[in-house]
Amino acid sequence: MRQKKFQKTGFTLIELLVVIAIIGLLASIVLVSLNSVRAKARDTKRIAELRQIQIALEMFYDQQGRYPQNQGGVCWDFCDPTTSHMRYFANCLEKGTNCGFTTTNFQPVMTKVPSDPLDNPSVNQGFNFHYFTGWEGRGPECYILGAHLETNHQVLNNDADGDGRNPGDNLCADPEYCIKVNWPCS
C-alpha cells in the first residue's frame, strides 16, 4: 500500500512576517507623503486667505482713506479672545472698531478674518499671520501682511522678501510669505 504524502497548505511564519513588514513599510511611506500634502494644502489656504485680507484692506482704504493702524495687543496671533493683535485687526475689518482711529460710515469688509490653520487660541504662537501698519511713527498709507509657510511653496519666489517692521529684522525672509503695500513708508 502506498502512503499518501500530505502537502502543506498555508504560509510559514517567516513568510507572514515578511509580508507584514512590507505592508508596514508601504504604509509609512504613504503616511509621510500624506503629511507633506497636508502641509502644502495648509500653505495654499494661508496664501489664499492673505489675498482675501489684502482685498479687504483695499476695500477698507477705499472707504476710510487709510489703512487700519493696529494698537498691538497682548500677543500677535489669536491667543486672547479680546486683546490680541489679530483680534484687534479682525474687529477693525469686521466691525470698524479697534482701527486706531474712529471710522466713519463703516461697512464691514470681511465677515470673519481667518486665522492660521494651525493656530491654537490658547497659546501665543507668535507671527502665524501678521499685519503691520502705522507702527513706530509710520503713516497709515502702507502695510505688511504675512504668514509663516510650512513648505518651500513656489509663491515664495515672487513675494516681498527682506525686512519687515525694522531694518535688519528679516521678518519677511523665507519661509515667511509677505505682501507689502507702499513699504517702506514714512
Image: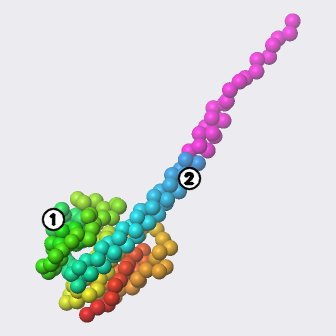
SS category of the residue bearing label 2: helix
Look at the image and give the residue range highlighted in magenta: 1-25
Q: Residue at x 41, y 83 (%)?
A: 161
Residue 40 appears in the rendering: yes
Can you tell which mark lies on residue 29?
A: 2
Can you tell which mark lies on residue 103?
A: none
Q: Nearer the viewer, mark 1 or mark 2?
A: 1
Can you tell which mark lies on residue 82?
A: 1
Q: CA distance from mark 1 to mark 2?
A: 43 Å
**Outermost residue to the left:** 102
| Residue 5 picture quarter | top right
Which quadrant holds the C terminus?
bottom left
Q: Residue at x 20, y 78 (%)?
A: 70
Residue 75 appears in the rendering: no
| Residue 99 picture quarter | bottom left
Residue 84 horizontal/vertical position (percent): 19, 69
Query: For this rendering, which residue is in front, 86 or 49?
Result: 49
**Outermost residue to the top:** 1
Residue 7, compared with residue 17, is above or below; it is: above
Residue 46 horizontal/vertical position (percent): 38, 67
Mark positioned earlier in the residue sequence (1 or 2): 2
Total marks drawn? Answer: 2
Which quadrant holds the N terminus?
top right
The answer to whether residue 101 is magenta is no
| Residue 9 picture quarter | top right
The amino acid sitting under disc 1 is: Thr
The amino acid sitting under disc 2 is: Ile
The answer to whether residue 10 is magenta is yes
Q: Residue at x 49, y 60 (%)?
A: 36
Residue 32 horizontal/vertical position (percent): 51, 55
